[in-house]
Amino acid sequence: MSRPQPEPVQVVKQRRDAALRALVSGVPYITYLGIQFDRRGDELTAVLPFDEKLIGNPMLPAIHGGVTAAFLEVAAIIELSWSVLWHEMEQGRLDPAQIEAHLPRLPKTIDFTVDYLRSGLPRDAYARARVNRSGRRYASVHVEAWQDNRLRPFAQATGHFLMPTRNG
């Protein structure tokens, strides 16, 4: 009794990267802000590269609070959607050739509370979200953003989301 050969690591990596690209490219605001995602296994880090258009107070200068909130919310929504997509890919319920046609709809924000801990400096920012609870209808996510030191976040947020129904 022989087992089928596992897929080469590069093929799996390319499929996962393509799925993440497809998920992110569906949101024009992510492109406008320049948010990127660094994927290591199933863990995502959102990256907000510095751009002058992100400055809200040129006297400090500091990243605009609305940009900070949007960055945190995008990180939370993409992490939540990625966790659903990852599970379906790993369970074999999602045909790799059909990923773009079967992307999950994005969760809808019920509420989103941001804590501004310090000014966001004019440099790259990073964020990681942690899904606290995810069910068929509701999810809770916590997200933190930092710049130079992950142990010194400049903002954090908690969001509650309405999960989309999946057809399939």
Image (cartoon, rainbow, N blue to C red):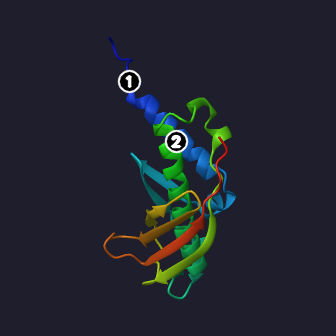
How packed mark 2 is, by other alpha carbons closer than 10 Å (few <14, some 14-19, many 20 or more), is: few
Q: Residue at 40% across / 70% down in the picture? A: 147
Quarter of the figure with residue 44: bottom left
The local secondary structure at tag 2 comes to: helix
Q: Is residue 155 visible?
A: yes
Placement of the N terminus among the 4 image quadrants: top left
The residue positioned farthest toward the bottom in the image shown: 59
1 or 2: mark nearer the eye: 2
Amino acid type shown at disc 2: Glu
Residue that carries the numbered disc 2 in the rendered image: 88
Please tell me whether mark 1 sits on a helix, a strand or a loop.
loop
Q: As displayed, is residue 4 above or below residue 163? A: above
Q: Quadrant of the C terminus?
A: top right
Query: Disc 1 vs disc 2: Cβ atoms closer than 8 Å?
Result: no
Report which residue position mark 1 lands on. 6
In terms of depth relative to the viewer, which is nearer, 116 or 7?
7
Residue at 46% in and 63% down: 133
The one of 61 and 76 positioned closer to us in this rendering: 76
CA–CA distance between discs 1 and 2? 18 Å
Residue at the image point whose x is 50% and y is 87% from the top: 60
Instruction: Say the numbered circle drawn on residue 147.
Output: none
Instruction: Please give left or right for residue 7 compared with residue 19 in the image.
Output: left
Identity of the amino acid at label 1? Answer: Pro
